[in-house]
Amino acid sequence: MFDTGTLAQYAPENEAQRATLEGSWSQGELREHMQRLLAFVHRNREDILQLAGDAPDAGSMLEATKRRIVDAGAVHPPSEMRDQVKAIQDEIWIRGERGDYDREHIAHEWTSRHAADWRRWRLMEYLFVVDRCAADIVARLAT
């Protein structure tokens, strides 16, 4: 099928990350991720089924869904860009409270230090949601 080695890099690295994801899920913080993910599955159905191979079962469909998410690098780019801009703005505000008012420098610094980790975490959240919404995803792909 395909190499899952790249999927492993988006798995929680420790119990603290897993607990954070579980907490976000149980508090409903990933609800929008779920809606965006199901829309992504609908838009990418053919690609996902092709990745899943001939006569796919539920496991191969879920793995193919995860692979498609990782390959795409995003599920819903507009909302992800908004969320990332908000994270940068939060950093600008925090630093401004400390007397650092160079917004452009702070934004550049945040991007160079945190953007890759931010993206990795967001993909980790989506893959976590795939596991939590497995039945819905398989049902949408099987029809």
Image (spheres, helix red, strand yellow):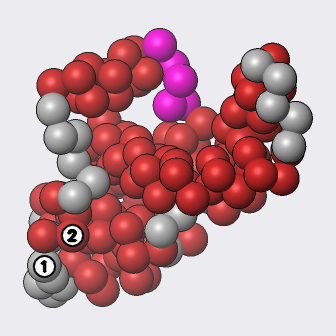
CB of mark 1 within 8 Å of CB of mark 2? Answer: yes
Task: Report crowding for label 2: few under 14, some 14 to 19, many 20 or more residues within 10 A (C-alpha).
Answer: few
Against 9, residue 51 (above or below) is: below
Q: In which quarter of the image is residue 112?
A: bottom right
Against 28, residue 108 (above or below) is: below
Q: Which label number is shown at residue 131? A: none
Residue type, label 1: Asp
Q: Can residue 93 be seen in this view?
A: no
Q: Distance between the residues labelled 1 and 2?
A: 7 Å
Q: Which label number is shown at residue 3? A: 1
* Residue 91 place in picture, x, y as percent: 70, 33
Quadrant occupied by the C terminus: bottom left
Magenta stretch: dominant SS? Answer: loop
Against 2, residue 121 (above or below) is: above
Give the magenta part as a residue range. Answer: 27-31
- Residue ID at (13%, 79%): 3
Element under disc 1: loop
Element under disc 2: helix
Query: In this rendering, would 129 be left or right of 34?
Result: left
Query: In this rendering, would 51 be left or right of 118?
Result: left
- Residue ID at (31%, 78%): 49
Residue type, label 2: Thr
Residue 29 lies within the magenta run: yes
* Residue 11 place in picture, x, y as percent: 22, 48
Between circles 1 and 2, the one closer to the viewer is: 2
Task: Report crowding for label 1: few under 14, some 14 to 19, many 20 or more residues within 10 A (C-alpha).
Answer: few
**Is 137 in front, or is 14?**
14
Q: Which label number is shown at residue 6? A: 2
